[in-house]
Image (spheres, rainbow, N blue to C red):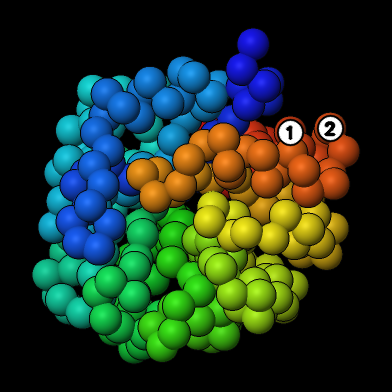
Amino acid sequence: MNPFAEHKKIDAHTHIGNFGSPFNVNFNTDLLLKQMEEFNIEKTTLCPAAYMLNEEVNTAYKQHPDKIIPLAWINANLGDAAYADAEHYLRDEGFAGLKMQPLFDGFTADSPAVDPVMEIARKYKKPVFIHCGHPPFSLPWQIGLLAERHPDVQIVMIHMGHGHGVYIDASITMAKKFDNLYLEISGMPMGCQIKNAYETVGEDRVMFGIDSPFHHPSVEIQRVLSCGLDEEGLENVFYNNAAKFMGL
């Protein structure tokens, strides 16, 4: 048996689509389904490769509604067009939440342009996932300020600070300060901080993710397996927390 398939999982953050320079990687629905079967992933919270490609996720969701939890990528820099997209995908297409990538789209996570997106999410009682860990656009402190302004919106800090130890620590600090902040751990290299977040932020506020096609499932799974949590903790991070958060 594949040792990485032992625990049932929900992937809280993955993409389909073609990512060009500097990544030059592609990941489609067929590859996603194969990955899910191989690594015992029951559901995947899915994003497109860019804000203009939400229909690719919508198509995958309609084909596999039992496996895919769809998020709409919203570029707050587009103003009214972005807000209309957020309304459409939450109201008309049944998407589970919204995702923002301030680094790629060039706005700060606490920009006033983000506030209408948050209000739309609040209206539909849906979460907002935000890329976290790159200056000057997606720093944990900026996401903390956003969480403070919108206490009724659940926010997931994707990567919980990513590859920088200071930002990882700050993500934990912000999540301890604001109880509407949750931590997704894909691409975050410090396994010890998974256990630290689990014990100090909350046992239900840390979620496993892969961030395909940028990271390999075996690497992301092994980081959780080696972080020092007991069996109950592993089951919570791999599956239970995301299931509860997404209302499954």
Residue corresponding to mark 2: 231
- Residue at the image position 59 percent from the left and 55 percent from the top: 185
Circle 2 crowding by C-alpha within 10 Å: few under 14, some 14–19, many from 20: few
Q: Are marks 2 and 1 in contact (CB under 8 Å)?
A: yes
* Quarter of the image that includes the C terminus: top right
Q: Which of 218 and 169 is in front in this view?
A: 218
- Residue 153, how many percent across, how many down? 50, 66
Q: Which residue is at 58% across, 42% downward?
A: 219
Residue 15 is drawn in which quadrant? top left
Where is 5 relative to 185, above or below? above
Q: In this view, does 231 lie to the left or right of 3?
A: right
**Where is 146 relative to 123, above or below?**
below
Q: Residue at x 21, y 38 (%)?
A: 58
Q: Is residue 61 left or right of residue 148?
A: left
- Circle 1 crowding by C-alpha within 10 Å: few under 14, some 14–19, many from 20: some
Q: Which amino acid does label 1 sit on?
A: Glu
Q: Position of residue 36 (x, y in %)?
A: 45, 25
The residues bearing labels 2 and 1 have C-alpha atoms spaced at a distance of: 6 Å
**184 and 113: which one is in front?**
184
Q: What element carries label 2?
A: helix
- Name the residue beneath numbered marker 1: 235
**Residue 205 badge:** none
